[in-house]
Image: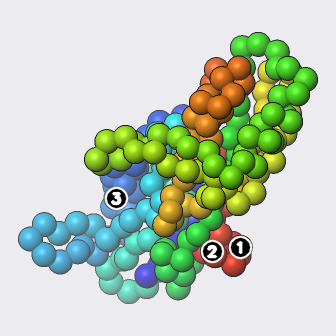
Amino acid sequence: MPRALFEKTGTAVYISHLDLMRLFQRAFKRAGLPLTHTKGFNPRPSVSIALPLSLGVSSHCELLDFDLEGEKVPNDVILEKLNACLVEGVSVLQVYDSGAKIGKIAYLECAVSLEYDRDLPENAVGQLTELFTREELIVEKKGKNGLTEQNISPMIKKLTVEPVSEREMVLHVLICCQNPTLNPMQLSAAIEKYLPDLAPDFSVCTRLEVYDIENNVFR
């Protein structure tokens, strides 16, 4: 089954996951690339996205699996036709065959920008660095069965804090993204809980890359 690597940036970050799926389904149709459909009582187009994005999160490493009817179409043709039918901010970067099984995705590299309406104290970087090296960081996680508590510390594999300006810092992190899964925005929740004086006034996340369990780039 072919796979597409795509990015979602700019105002497109406010397209929900379900609307993004519909967007791609319409793009394939407009591009003259008919998708196969699943079998069963309620057939659906054969298209899926590996790790659904939360609303407002941008990404340069999204993976889309799809299956086309008829004879094989060259991957470069698929890329060109799809990009001609997508909206601004959603762009296919690569199309290729024989991608690894999605279940082998293990880690996500991302950047979480922390923005403040005030100047930060001089020791802000040190405080955050110390916080995320603790053995236990309990934050609340919203799930299907309501709120539960989760220790996010074991799911943080690497983290560095970069000061950008007197009112902005960026967390560069490598975290678990499947079994178990850590939502990078929970890092902001941990700051708010344990270091309320450093709670950001605004935070935003960008996905940069996905890796397998051996830290190889996943494709």
Q: Is residue 119 left or right of residue 156?
A: right
Q: Tell me the residue that label 1 is attached to.
A: 215
Q: CA distance from mark 1 to mark 2?
A: 5 Å
User: Percent position (x, y) of residue 199?
Assistant: 66, 25
- Identify the secondary structure beneath mark 1: loop
Q: Residue furthest right?
A: 122
User: Percent position (x, y) of residue 167?
Assistant: 80, 21
Mark 1 or 3: in front is 1
First in sequence: mark 3 or mark 2? 3
Examine the image and state in which quarter residue 21 appears. Answer: bottom left
Q: At label 3, which amino acid type do we have? A: Gln
Mark 2 nearby-residue class (10 Å; few <14, some 14–19, many ≥20): some
Residue 151, can we see it?
A: yes
Q: Is residue 203 above or below residue 142?
A: above
Q: Tell me the residue that label 2 is attached to.
A: 212
Looking at the image, do the residues carrying marks 1 and 3 touch, with CB atoms under 8 Å apart? no
- Identify the secondary structure beneath mark 3: helix
Examine the image and state in which quarter residue 206 appears. Answer: top right
Q: CA distance from mark 3 to mark 2?
A: 28 Å
Residue 89, can we see it?
A: no
Residue drawn at x 36%, y 47% as measured from the top left: 143
Looking at the image, do the residues carrying marks 1 and 2 touch, with CB atoms under 8 Å apart? yes
Q: Is residue 127 above or below residue 117?
A: below
Q: Tell me the residue that label 3 is attached to.
A: 25
Q: What colour scheme has been applied to the protein in the rendered image?
A: rainbow
Q: CA distance from mark 1 to mark 3?
A: 32 Å
